[in-house]
Amino acid sequence: MAWYDRIIGRKPEVEEKLNPAQPYYDHKVEPSRERVVNYERAYEDLEIVNRGVNMIVDDTSEIPISVGGQVQGMSSVVKGIKRSRVDLLLNKEPNPFQDISTFRRNLVTDYLLDGNIFIYFDGVHLYHLPANKVTIHADETKYIEKFTFNEIINYKPSEIIHIKDNSFYSIYRGVSRLKPALRTMILMRSMRDFQDNFFKNGAVPGLVLKSPNTLSEKIKERMIQSWSARYKPDAGGRRPLILDGGIEVDSISNVNFKELDFQSAIAENEKIVLKALGVPPIMLDSGNNANLRPNMRMYYLETILPIVRKMNFALERYFGFALSEDITDIPALQPELRDQSQYYSALVNTGIISPNEARAALGFESVEGYDDLRVPANIAGSAANPDEGGRPVEEGEE
């Protein structure tokens, strides 16, 4: 029996026992602070993170959902909702305030940055709840006791559609796709900060003032103040300085401006980030398009479609209608459609499935008169009447 069956009072068909490990789970699962501190900031500050995330968000959000009939034997959460209503919510208007494109983009952004999607269904509309503000509560007898938004608003488990990415430490919350690249993103931001601070200092390294004499602390402090007042590289001020008393100026280190560019390190780090997201780096390399098409196909098959299907499975389980992705308008997957078409054509021509069954598998409506199985020509009786079987009747024979 599903956890929400207990919430709505549905009786189990067979006697079930509580998971013995349930009492030992962490029963208040807070949003990950890593997301707030690192993933969101990386999305805002690092171009490669922003570009990679937005690329997946855009491509995932534009794939329509085909709503089929009710799934037999499935204990859905929502009862009595019409197929047309589900299609309207998932493909056109989830709520009065958002179009479906904006709604999906919010969901997928949360999925990538937080590893979780939370959707509130009020019985009429669907609303996105920002994942970083949702806390999951469980107890020893229920899988989920409640969801809390912003530590104020409580939701019943039956009101929330929770979609989570893979996780190795929690059965309740998913993990951000960026987690494997966390150290890399921190390093990239550190390099960016170093460059910013260096050029704020007028591209001048730290300086040392050398004196042949022993100076008192008071004289040292006066010299620092005098130097700082006259020489301000961050403001472009470089007044001529006259040094007396044997004072010499030296830099702390020699600066190699080529090394300060960090281009090689940044390029390698960007690849790590893209791989964590599941985006082939070649897709963002404008100078190399030779293998773009096969990589684009792999990107859709290995990254985009699994996210879409995970979302569809959760929504299917909630509403009880069969859901599938419509990929007919995705150029990168047209070879996949050709392969499927050839496969189902072979099944139809060998009499294994009917033409309408093939059309349904490819996402097309059935056509009247195409429900019968075809008899292959090599075992048919004749072209005029193939259902009889046997050797074709020749002229003059009965």
Image (tube, grey):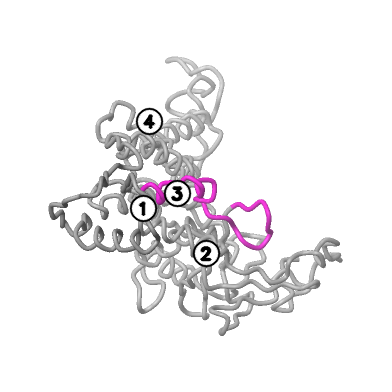
Report how far apart the C-alphas of labels 4 and 3 lie in the structure.
Answer: 28 Å
Give the numbered dot on residue 294.
Answer: 4
Q: Based on the picture, tell me whether residue 70 belongs to the magenta stretch.
A: no
Secondary structure category for the residue under label 4 = helix
In this view, the residue in front, 2 or 367, is 2
State the image coordinates of residue 94 (x, y, percent, origin top left): 41, 72
Magenta stretch in the rendered image: 166-191
Q: Residues within 10 Å of mark 4 (few under 14, many from 20)?
A: few
* Residue type, label 1: Asp
* Residue type, label 4: Pro
Measuring 52% from the left and 28% from the top, which residue is drawn there?
350
- Residue underneath mark 3: 185
In this view, the residue in front, 366 or 246, is 246
Furthest-bottom residue in this view:
152
Q: Residues within 10 Å of mark 1 (few under 14, many from 20)?
A: few
State the image coordinates of residue 104 (x, y, percent, origin top left): 41, 63
- Residue underneath mark 2: 117
- Residue underneath mark 1: 193
Report how far apart the C-alphas of labels 3 and 1 lie in the structure.
Answer: 12 Å
* Residue type, label 2: Ile
Residue 35 relative to residue 142: left or right: left
Quarter-wise, where is residue 222 in the image?
A: bottom left
State the image coordinates of residue 239 (x, y, percent, origin top left): 13, 55
Quarter-wise, where is residue 74 in the image?
A: bottom right
Q: Is residue 386 above or below residue 394?
A: below
Q: Earlier in the sequence, mark 4 or mark 3?
A: 3
